[in-house]
Amino acid sequence: MEQQFADTHPDFAYSAAIIRYVNEKELEKRFRQLTPRVQKSVPGIAVSNHLQIFRSTQPGGLAPDFTLLSLTGDSIRLSDYKGKHVFLEFWGSWCGPCRMMSPKLIAFNHTLPSDSSIIMIGIACNEASKKNWKKAVEEDNLNWIQVLEENNQGKLSVSRQYAIDGYPTSLLIDPRGKIILRGHPEHILGKASALLGLSSK
């Protein structure tokens, strides 16, 4: 019903707020249907900013740098891994589909070379507590780098820097810091393995 309202009321700022929660391809289309006045409203600008970030973090774009604390308390900075391939996994302990992907991610991790030329980082988002996050990591045996996104007021969260709306979402970043794959891990793990020349062990 709300999406129908947005379709029939393109001159209402509320319509911009409604369409924010559809997928990005649909969002592009619906945003163009809004009147110029609504596109320039506060919710319209929020949608425009989100789309701009989403476009810039597609394959070919540069991966935004970030620094987050790991499970062991270490400071993990993405740019410290320049010169290596990096596989990012945005997930959450609360996310059923994320937890269901754990066995496939573990299998992928087992194929990575021992020379650390390919780094895997799990980014836990929207966690209610560190305890829940740590418990999920232990239960699922996620033995690659695990970091926790912390939403600092006034600062764009890492998931927002990457325009992550759905979980899980994975990205493969090349040694220059460019994104070369983005999508649900179910869809890109095979492509990542092929690009990286990995074989099952």
Image: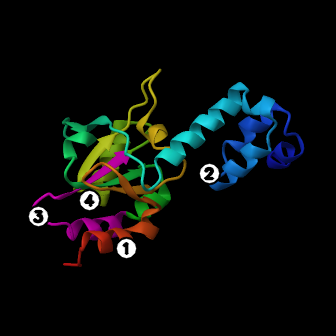
Q: Position of residue 144 (x, y in %)?
A: 23, 54
**Residue annotated with mark 2:** 24
**Residue annotated with mark 1:** 190
**Mark 4 crowdedness (10 Å alpha carbons): few <14, some 14-19, many ≥20:** few
Alpha-carbon distance for marks 4 and 2? 32 Å
When the figure is inspected, residue 184 is found, relative to residue 47, above or below; the finding is below
Alpha-carbon distance for marks 1 and 2? 24 Å
Q: Position of residue 46 (x, y in %)?
A: 63, 32
When the figure is inspected, residue 64 is found, relative to residue 138, above or below; the finding is above
**Residue annotated with mark 4:** 141
Which residues make up the magenta segment? Answer: 102-123
**Residue annotated with mark 3:** 114
Q: Earlier in the sequence, mark 4 or mark 2?
A: 2
Q: Nearer the viewer, mark 4 or mark 2?
A: 2
Alpha-carbon distance for marks 2 and 3? 37 Å
The answer to whether residue 86 is magenta is no
Alpha-carbon distance for marks 4 and 3? 18 Å
Viewed as shown, does residue 4 lie left or right of 17?
A: right
Q: Residue at x 46, y 69 (%)?
A: 187
Q: What SS does tag 3 mark?
A: loop
Q: Earlier in the sequence, mark 1 or mark 4?
A: 4
Are dots 4 and 2 in contact, CB under 8 Å? no
The kind of residue on which mark 4 rests is Asn
The answer to whether residue 164 of the structure is visible from this angle is no
